[in-house]
Amino acid sequence: NAGVTQTPKFQVLKTGQSMTLQCAQDMNHNSMYWYRQDPGMGLRLIYYSASEGTTDKGEVPNGYNVSRLNKREFSLRLESAAPSQTSVYFCASSDPDRRQPQHFGDGTRLSIL
Amino acid sequence: RKEVEQDPGPFNVPEGATVAFNCTYSNSASQSFFWYRQDCRKEPKLLMSVYSSGNEDGRFTAQLNRASQYISLLIRDSKLSDSATYLCVVNSVSGGYNKLIFGAGTRLAVHP
């Protein structure tokens, strides 16, 4: 029962490096999301994809890009990592029905030096 | 003002205690409400949905007051395993997608 799977679980980057965080879900959900979580703050939405083929900016999109590769997969890319992007990143998925909660992956802990 | 506000705690309670968490939200058009639980360094997991009439799941009771834009979570007979951060989450449909707004969380520590 995989649910939402994120890779990698941990990553250390140097300032200016690029990387892609991967997310896949096997629940046949239409909507997928990327959040970041920083100490003392709630989860903040970076980007979301309401359905396959669409992506939109969330609350904190600067410095990130996303790709909804197919219904299952939604990746988050940092083109030029900055120390301010040190955070825990969570991917989530849901049905668009407002009554349905989101299901989360177990996170990627990213440190940028 | 934050869209979803919670007392950050921590709430330090002995085993067996009853503890209540409160949450307020600012968007009167919000449509669905949830409590999530997040253990240290783990992902948030759905604890329970919150229904207009209030609802109970074992030792957990959730209440919603739409007029006051207020949500609560009551935990009875606290267990050590209840120690976690509890996230108040408010949903609204915006631009065709299921948008969740998360509170920063209330930390609960249950001690022997």
Image (tube, coloured by chain):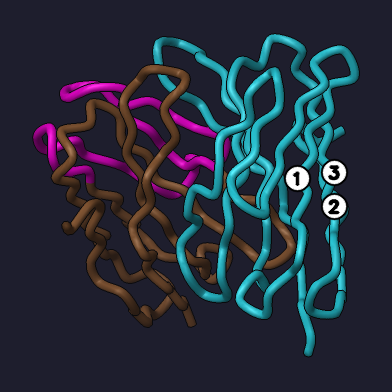
Chain colours: A brown, B cyan
Residue B37 numbered tag: none
Real-space CA distance between mark 3 and mark 2, rounded to the nearest whole angstrom: 7 Å
Task: Give A56 or B95, whichever is nearer the viewer.
Answer: B95
Q: Residues within 10 Å of mark 3 (few under 14, many from 20)?
A: some
Q: Say which residue label 2 marks.
A: B20
- Magenta residues? A45-74
Mark 3 and 1 residues: CB-CB less than 8 Å, in contact? no
Q: For mark 1, give the secondary structure.
A: strand
Real-space CA distance between mark 3 and mark 1, rounded to the nearest whole angstrom: 7 Å
Quarter occupied by the N terminus of chain A? bottom left
Q: For mark 2, give the secondary structure.
A: strand
Q: Say which residue label 3 marks.
A: B22
Under mark 1, the amino acid is Leu
Under mark 2, the amino acid is Ala
Residue at the spot x=47%, y=70% of the render? B42
- Residue A73 drawn in magenta: yes
Q: Say which residue label 1 marks.
A: B73
Under mark 3, the amino acid is Asn
Circle nearer the N terminus (3, 1)? 3
User: Is residue A98 depicted above or below B21 in this figure?
Assistant: above
User: Is residue B54 depicted above or below B27 in this figure?
Assistant: below
